[in-house]
Amino acid sequence: MTAEQEIALGLQAAPQMAQQYGGLHPDQQARAAVERIGQQIVRSTKAGQTPYKFAFHLLADENTINAFALPGGQIFITAGLLKNMKTEGQVAGVLAHEIGHVVGRHSAEQVAKSKLTQGLTGAAAIGIYDPDRPSTMAGAAGAAMVGKLLTLRFGREDELEADRLAVDFVPAAGYDPRSMLQVMQVLHSKNEGGGPPEFMSTHPNPGNRIGEIQREIDAKYPGGVPSGLKQ
């Protein structure tokens, strides 16, 4: 898949993905804050040097704890997850992880591995997509690829790579990378309170993610995390 095809596929799937979580949140101020934090990370990191068109969306679902990324840069966080974040740095940690999935091309690779893009049908379906006319992604092939994205589950290596990228992205944008540890602690606490948050099923825990993130931070800052980074 080319970057242009990834962007087209993500734009095609975005409305259906949002619909699954009750659409976009009505609070314009909260939505703008999510977009601001996300774009700060993009501007400050190599994500901004990619061809991807990043956009950040706050979803209306107050009960589901999740965040996810579509190919090409469409990134979503539910109100259920956002309300459990206590600092801007924690929100940045979540969004940076999802940006990592986009930069790592993780969902695009899964779509490609599913062989939905094989042959002229799949390629043509994406190739003729016009972002100004979203209905132009043709027929069954386009629908099948969107369907695959709606049920995506990341694997161990994808999760670890997204975390490693986020440890680079978060401080580059001015936030303390230890906020990512706090996010994981919040998710674990929700896991113990009953059924696991949906985030843990779409982003499976590859062993001890907290330990892996801490090792990445220690390797990046052997003398300790610099002061002055925003929590």
Image (cartoon, helix red, strand yellow):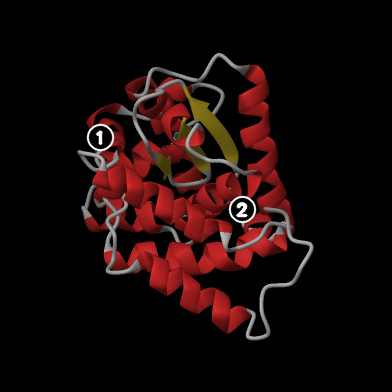
Task: Return the x and y of residue 92 as percentages of the image width and height.
Answer: 60, 49
Amino acid type of the residue that numbered disc 1 sits on in the rendered structure: Gly
Q: Is residue 2 left or right of residue 17?
A: right
Quadrant housing residue 37 = top right
Residue at 42 percent across and 48 percent down: it is 186
Residue at 48 percent across and 78 percent down: it is 215
Task: Return the x and y of residue 97 as percentages of the image width and height.
Answer: 49, 55
How many residues crowd around disc 2 within 10 Å: few (fewer than 14), some, or many (20 or more)? few
Does residue 230 appear anywhere in the picture?
yes
Amino acid type of the residue that numbered disc 2 sits on in the rendered structure: Pro
Q: Is residue 51 left or right of residue 162?
A: right
Quadrant housing residue 91 = top right
Tag 1 secondary structure: helix
Q: Is residue 74 left or right of residue 40?
A: left
- In the rendered view of the protein, which quadrant contains the N terminus? bottom left
* Residue on which disc 2 sits: 51
Mark nearer the N terminus (2 vs 1): 2
Residue at 23 percent across and 36 percent down: it is 144
Does residue 120 appear anywhere in the picture?
no
Quadrant housing residue 31 = top right
How many residues crowd around disc 1 within 10 Å: few (fewer than 14), some, or many (20 or more)? some
* Residue on which disc 1 sits: 147
Residue at 41 percent across and 23 percent down: it is 62
Task: Return the x and y of residue 15 as percentages of the image width and height.
Answer: 42, 24
Task: Return the x and y of residue 104 as percentages of the image width and height.
Answer: 46, 62
Cα separation between marks 2 and 1: 24 Å
Q: Are the residues at dot 2 and dot 1 in contact (C-beta closer than 8 Å)?
A: no
